[in-house]
């Protein structure tokens, strides 16, 4: 099925072959050089080690970043605060990441992706070992913000590393595996903290997550192959600012950034509040069972890792429509007062979110013809701003209107995803008609 049949973008799928009509920058030199054939591909040398290393980095990133999310009711109880205040332990971490991801991506352009990722993980796990000893909510929020800032070196650098070291046809699958690691980290961190906290409290629970992250960080550094296609860039502010302007001037990238933010607004809101809903009547579930609810993240692992095949069948816009529709269906189903239906709703929300995130983030990596770390950093910044907004607005809506308020916020965000995708389809058709092509040249 062609992109014209599905409304999918041809430029994203072929970005490595030709520049888009809206970009004056030349194609990536590494893609056109004789050394391009030496990039990693499934079954080739180093691919499995690279996949496992970045999978473990994804596990550590999400396990640390959201280590307090399943524990918010316990944190509220210890410090005597409402859900909207306790949610800042999540929002501070994601906000810190959002603020620092662009500067950290600039460092990775100069000092290398592997170096920056290793340093980021080292600092983040060190802070993670201090989090259990936070004496107050303010101190906990401050440590979480520092931890998020440290983790900022991971997401954008990882995507840039993949874009440089993996062949274009395997890029969606490779990034999907990294995103799958995110889902496993988010799931395992929440499940482990739920059961441990039920017996020994939230402080011991986040300490164990920190120790798991230490093991992941060591394995990541040992396994990740040295980069072979990295070319150091400049740290000059004017160069960085020019690269950022170029990316923000690209309408396709702007739309992808907005889509990532909106998907994460849904996800951040739902998973920040779900623990509060399930501890209240008519569910009244214990902390360990609530933590086990996060096993549905395994669905995200599957949907993210298979996003490449989905794109191959229905195109990128088709995949985004399916992801948005699945997420919206999950939100509606979760309104019903049945544990089984709430669980089904979470399964649909998680599957839709991770598929949409994998598709959008891989499209960013393939669309950027230069400054890939900055392009990915801008996506990650928007993505984690969406998480912070979703956490705080979703918790506020829950406090005011209950679960229905949180679902309403999520449905508005999904409507935004669909609207942006529709506008992208129309823009692509206009560009194709203007250039005299039957298929769109830009999204």
Image (spheres, rainbow, N blue to C red):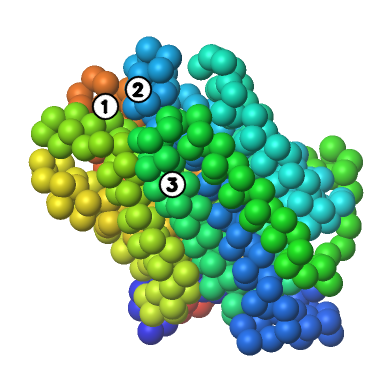
Rendered location of residue 128, percent (x, y): 62, 36
Residue at screen point 58% across, 21% down: 134
Q: Residues within 10 Å of mark 2 (few under 14, many from 20)?
A: many
> At numbered mark 2, what does the secondary structure look like: helix, strand or loop?
helix
**Residue 236 seen in the figure:** yes
- Pointer 3 residue: 192
Decide: marks 1, 2 in contact (CB < 8 A)? Answer: yes
CA–CA distance between discs 3 and 2? 21 Å
Reply above or below: 249 against 237.
Answer: below
SS state under label 3: helix
Which residue is labeled 2 in the image? Answer: 83
Q: Is residue 243 above or below residue 81?
A: below
Label 3 crowding class (10 Å Cα cut-off): few <14, some 14-19, many 20+?
Answer: many
Q: Position of residue 165 (x, y in %)?
A: 73, 71
> Which residue is farthest front?
199
Q: Residue at x 64, y 77 (%)?
A: 48
| Horizontal relation, residue 76 to residue 402: left or right | right
Mark 1, residue position: 398
Confirm or deny contact between disc 3 and disc 2 (CB under 8 A).
no
Q: Is residue 234 left or right of residue 117?
A: right
């Amino acid at each position: 099925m062609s992109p014209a049949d599905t409304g999918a973008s041809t430029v994203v799928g072929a970005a490595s072959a030709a520049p888009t009509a809206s970009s004056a920058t030349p194609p990536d030199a590494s893609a056109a050089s004789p050394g391009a054939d030496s990039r990693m591909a499934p079954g080739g040398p180093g691919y499995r080690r690279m996949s496992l290393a970045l999978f473990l980095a994804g596990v550590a990133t999400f396990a640390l970043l959201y280590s307090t999310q399943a524990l918010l009711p316990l944190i509220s109880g210890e410090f005597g605060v409402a859900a909207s205040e306790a949610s800042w332990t999540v929002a501070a971490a994601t906000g810190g990441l959002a603020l620092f991801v662009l500067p950290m991506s600039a460092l990775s352009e100069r000092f290398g992706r592997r170096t920056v990722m290793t340093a980021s993980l080292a600092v983040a796990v060190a802070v993670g070992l201090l989090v259990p000893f936070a004496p107050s909510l303010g101190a906990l929020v401050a440590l979480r913000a520092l931890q998020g800032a440290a983790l900022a070196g991971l997401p954008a650098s990882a995507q840039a590393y993949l874009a440089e070291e993996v062949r274009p046809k395997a890029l969606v699958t490779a990034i999907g595996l990294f995103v799958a690691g995110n889902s496993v980290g988010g799931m395992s961190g929440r499940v482990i903290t739920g059961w441990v906290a039920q017996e020994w409290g939230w402080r011991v629970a986040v300490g164990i997550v920190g120790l798991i992250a230490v093991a992941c960080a060591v394995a990541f550094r040992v396994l990740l192959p040295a980069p072979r296609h990295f070319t150091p860039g400049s740290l000059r502010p004017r160069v960085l600012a020019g690269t950022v302007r170029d990316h923000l001037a690209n309408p396709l990238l702007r739309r992808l950034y907005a889509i990532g933010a909106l998907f994460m607004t849904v996800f951040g809101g739902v998973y920040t509040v779900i623990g509060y809903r399930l501890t209240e009547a008519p569910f009244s579930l214990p902390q360990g069972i609530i933590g086990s609810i996060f096993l549905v993240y395994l669905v995200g692992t599957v949907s993210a890792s298979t996003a490449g095949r989905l794109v191959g069948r229905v195109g990128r816009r088709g995949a985004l429509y399916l992801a948005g529709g699945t997420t919206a269906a999950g939100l509606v189903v979760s309104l019903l007062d049945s544990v089984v239906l709430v669980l089904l709703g979470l399964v649909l929300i998680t599957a839709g979110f991770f598929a949409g995130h994998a598709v959008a983030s891989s499209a960013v990596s393939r669309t950027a013809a230069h400054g890939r770390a900055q392009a990915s950093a801008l996506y990650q910044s928007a993505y984690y701003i969406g998480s912070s907004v979703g956490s705080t607005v979703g918790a506020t809506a829950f406090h005011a209107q209950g679960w229905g308020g949180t679902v309403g916020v999520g449905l508005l965000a999904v409507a935004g995803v669909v609207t942006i995708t529709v506008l992208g389809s129309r823009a692509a058709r206009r560009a194709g008609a203007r250039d005299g092509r039957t298929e769109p040249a830009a999204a």
